Image: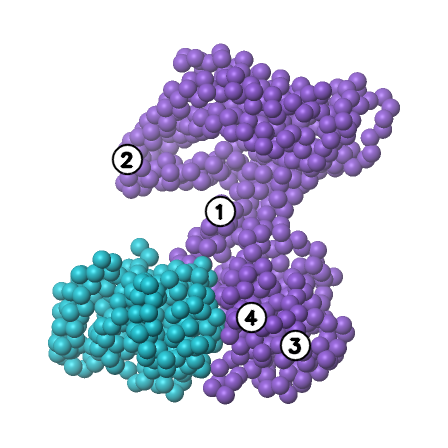
Amino acid sequence: MVEQLSSPEPASDLDRHPGQCVAFAATFDTVTRSATFPAAGYERAAVELLTDLGFEFGLPRPTTTTLLDTFDGRLHRSGLRLQMTDGDGVELALSGDDTTPAHLVVDAAPRVPEDLPSGPVRARVAAVVGERALLPRLRTSAQRTRGLLRDAAGKVVAIADVHDEVRVLDRPDAHLVATIEIHEVPGYPKHARRALESLRRLGLVESETDTLAQCAAAAGVDLAGFTATATVPLEPDMAAIDGFRLVLANLATTIAANWQGTIDQSDPEFLHDLRIAVRQTRTVLAAAKHVLPAEIRDLARDEFAWLADLTSTPRDLDVYLLEWSSYTDPLGPEVAASLEPVRDLLERRRNDGHVALERGLCSERAATLMNTWQGWLATPSVRDGLPRRALRPLGPLVAKRIARAHEIVLEHGRRIGPDTPAEHVHDLRKDAKKLRYLLECFGGLLPKGARKRYVKRLRALQDNLGEHQDAEVHTHMLRAVATELHDIGASADTMLAIGQLTERLDQQRHAARIEFAERFADYDTPATQRALDAVLDRITT
Amino acid sequence: MKILATYSIKGGVGKTTTAINLAHEAAATGARVLLWDLDPQGAATFFVRVKPSVKGGAERLVSRAGALGANIRATDDPAVHIVPADFSLRHLDLELDDTKHPTRRLGELLVPVADRYDVALLDCAPGITLSSEGVFEATDALVVPTIPTTLSERTLEQLASFLAEQSRSPILLPFASMLDRRKRLQRELVAHLVNDVPGFLRTAIPNASVIEQMGTERAPVAVFAPRSVAATAFRDLWAEIAERVWT
């Protein structure tokens, strides 16, 4: 949105609603308005014109700008922009949600908020970014010539930045000729307006976005990032095969989007998102019996099982290490220090797991799987010779699958008593996950409110099963590591500390197991059945 | 947003130079800073080259909601904005006295801009007045420049006693200002203050000509003399204040 110059001048830019501040409510490093040049050569005329208005221009300086954000664009979606400018030193600027940008001098691009010095910028970035890593989403270079307009006291009252030879790095095809940006200084709106009016009279066309956003558009970079969502729009009366293909195609997009990030290990969430999408794919494939052609379904089931298996060890160890301090901090600093060899060994194993995963993802087998799978999903389905349920309405079929998944959770859950082996509890956890995945993947068919109410009940059970499973898996890992460390002569302190940590994890596992009976009893009620009926009511017939 | 104030009962102790330099140092650590020049002399406003003028004067500033935002000006440091002084602020006590809750008013005026800044730094006029009481009520911490004389210590004690009697009082962060390290008596007095006065900050700001140059440079010391002892001292002082206020 661009503010009209003829609009009455507000009391202050800072009093404007943020949504109305795009045009004029920024300071030196936040774009207020930018005018693009329709052809090369205008920049010299513009500089001459601005010089006549009193702007004093310095020498052109090579500038490299890196826009940092998470893969899923969390900063952008929060109205924030974190950009690193490498010109006279490396400066990080956080701007966008209001009119005052924050600045920091940094040594290198932060990968996670913890890489930033403690203070307001780190706190604001961390609050938005969460567990995700900051990645370079866009890198641009330009020759920047800055012009300052000062008043009689020498105070800067307007700024002009001429960006020449604007390029998107690593994308030679994305090339802007030049831009000029006029920045209003809060409290001094008239000077920037005068400059803009003059540039318009020169014939320059004002754009609605700044240079960086134009670069992103030229390079085809979506600043909103990629967000994985399992839910796609579906209709209950569409043919089952069409609905299943839409769901699976959406999941394949998520898998593909997270593929390279998983290989690069630039953010543990890539592996998480890839693993979830693979698991969801497997659940949907299992539910697609007599819907998808057997040959493609069987191939996909086998190959995604192989892919899921590849992701297990590195993801389990990622989680273990991410949660490490929450396990060890309660044991005190001395015990935590004695456990460092354990952590080192777990990290080595995690790295080995990632190497194996990377090898798998870069293999011919993986390439064949994805090419075959995406190719099949992209090809329109032939209506002849399809399995017997392929052309049935999607809604009732999905309702049946979800109802059956719910029954399985109840049947298996009712069999679990205090002495039931842990494997059976783990199996129940997998049953609950499959049910949850079906609800998410076919969420487009289901009423949102009813689904939310039912999932809340299911999630309470899943949380308990998750706590039990994490403690169980991590105890097993710890025992295996203990044997290995004992064999290589770890210190007595380390072995004692392992004992303490094992005991602690065992207590957690035991507590979760005791709590299970109560959680399952809460789930296995007529109220849950009614909640599920409300979810499926609309699509059952 | 944390609200701090540079304050002293005494005048000429370095309040304004401290406010300007601390605003710069806070911004250098990534904070968005709003400086509010409450002193009708307008020295802080002068240092940042802004015209000392408030629309409608102190009366409108105090009486209208949102008036503070309407008077915010950018400084040449992009992360530091200022509400400039105005000569009518000499009547600030009278204007505050006309409001329903005089000592709460300054804090109320800051509420609408609280989510736009990380730090508000109020540069106060000397003395204990109604507006000072409003500052005490609004702020999280009072940064008190203390020149190394026995009389200053006494003034500091008076301030501490006064605050102790208030229902709500900010953290008191006194520090040695205008220290002449060549003088043994001053060094000894500062050592005594740091060791014996609760909350007295370890960092001392020197009595340096480079600080006086701020009047001609019209910029924080770190801008025109970044490697000077004074610039380092202000950086250390901000680090110490931030540690006290944010932890």
The x and y percentages for residue A470 are: 45, 29
The amino acid type of the residue labelled 4 equals: Pro
Q: CA distance from mark 4 to mark 1?
A: 37 Å
Locate residue A192: give its quadrant: bottom right
| Same chain, labels 2 and 3 | yes
| Same chain, labels 4 and 2 | yes
Q: CA distance from mark 2 to mark 1?
A: 35 Å
Residue contact between numbered discs 4 and 3, judged by CB atoms under 8 Å: no
Which residue is rendered at x = 65% and y = 76% of the image? A196
- Provide the secondary structure element on which disc 1 rests: loop
Foreground tag (2 vs 3): 3
Between B135 and A140, the residue placed more toward the observer is B135
Could you say which chain is coloured cyan in the image? Answer: B
Q: Which mark is residue A196?
A: 3
Q: CA distance from mark 1 to mark 3?
A: 40 Å
| First along the sequence among labels 4 and 3 | 4
| Same chain, labels 4 and 1 | yes
User: 10 Å neighbourhood of mark 4: few (<14), some, or many (≥20)?
Assistant: few
Q: CA distance from mark 4 to mark 3?
A: 18 Å
| First along the sequence among labels 1 and 3 | 1
- Please determine whether, in this image, residue A250 is positioned above or below residue A157: above
- Provide the secondary structure element on which disc 3 rests: helix
Q: Which mark is residue A493?
A: 2
Mark 1, residue position: A130
Residue contact between numbered discs 2 and 1, judged by CB atoms under 8 Å: no
| Same chain, labels 2 and 1 | yes
> Is B182 placed left or right of A68 in the picture?
left
